[in-house]
Amino acid sequence: MLEKALRLYTPSLSEKPMAEFLADKCDDLGFEDIQIDEVGNLIAKKGSGSPKIMLCGHMDVVPGKVKVRKEGDSLYGRGASDAKAPLMAMLFAAASIQNNNGTIIFVGAVDEEGNATGIKNLVKKEMDMDYAVFGEPSGIKQVTIAYKGRLAINLKISVENSSHASAPWLSKNAIEESMIFAKELRERLEADQEDKTKGMLLTVTMTEIKGGTSHNVTPKECETIFDIRIPVDLNCKSIEQKIATLVKEIAQKRKVEAFYSILDETEPFEAPHNSPLVRAFTLGIMEVEHSRPTLIRKTGTGDMNVLGNQWNIPVVTYGPGDPHEAHTIDEKVSVKEYLKGIEILKKTLQHLKRLHDRKMR
């Protein structure tokens, strides 16, 4: 089933084949109320009674095809790790739920790798969930309880004039000014972090640059895109205020015009460590793997940030797969780990039912 899912190439906002594939599988596995919502999310229900648990994985992958093949214990394909193995593991774990043992809402979300269109649409709905689990590769012995936030900004630098490339001294060069500007902006935003772990670092990364109109004319304008990751002890607003001050200061110092706009904004999120959900995962992993899981903070940003900051319910992110395989040119997942992941999720759902009922008594 995972191999079939990997053969469907589904970059962000082109997930329809995967949604239809999952809808068919949900029907075969006895799910009810199967629907594809207005933005393309697949939503299906299994079981009944309490607790109400959302299992949400994303159907989209980053661009770039990877030949689907099995070599030994490894299954290769775009999305093998991020995040079709976690998504399919959730599907089969949810399928095991019988009536009166809890209600599972299984979601295949769109656009997690893009602007989170799927989860942003989902959190607007009144769904009255008790718990939510997001499917991302964590490795089967690790449970993700925190993600950094994200700010994407577009910085546009303009200089007064352009000149012929044979006389570059006649004007400032917008590309060169952008490089100087970007270096200073990064250094000042990332300052005073010597004692911090990677999970708690604020990072500033240039990801795109665009400037110039001709091979023999100095550029008058240049645009740079920055991807800024924000740890859980900071927030987007404080970083935005800092950026506004720094852009103004550096522009005055360099005597250039600078204008920035925010392209994307996601707050950081850390889930409670002592919820019944974390306890259920601990018990489920110990039962299958005979060792306690590690609770981890990830340096990326996920759909958990959006829902966790809005719904105020216990939430974690979990799934088979090596997070370092995500987005790589030869992405793969261990078949053994994928199958163990299904077992761990099944056990976790059983423990969660018991722990929730005890809490409600």
Image: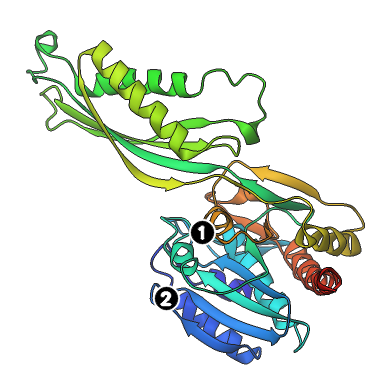
**Disc 2 designates what residue?**
16
**Residue type of the residue flagged with mark 1:** Val
- Crowd band around label 2 with a 10 angstrom C-alpha radius: few (<14), some (14–19), many (20+): some
Classify mark 1: helix, strand or loop: loop
Residue 9 locus on image (x, y percent): 46, 67
| Scheme of colours in the image | rainbow
Classify mark 2: helix, strand or loop: helix
Residue 120 locus on image (x, y percent): 45, 62
- The residue drawn where x is 39% and y is 22% is 185
Q: Nearer the viewer, mark 2 or mark 1?
A: 2
- The residue drawn where x is 69% and y is 53% is 138
**Residue type of the residue flagged with mark 2:** Lys
* Labelled pair 2, 1 in contact (Cβ < 8 Å): no
Q: Is residue 144 above or below residue 22?
A: above
- The residue drawn where x is 66% and y is 84% is 46
Residue 56 locus on image (x, y percent): 59, 68
Q: Nearer the viewer, residue 67 or 120?
A: 120
Q: Which mark is residue 66?
A: 1
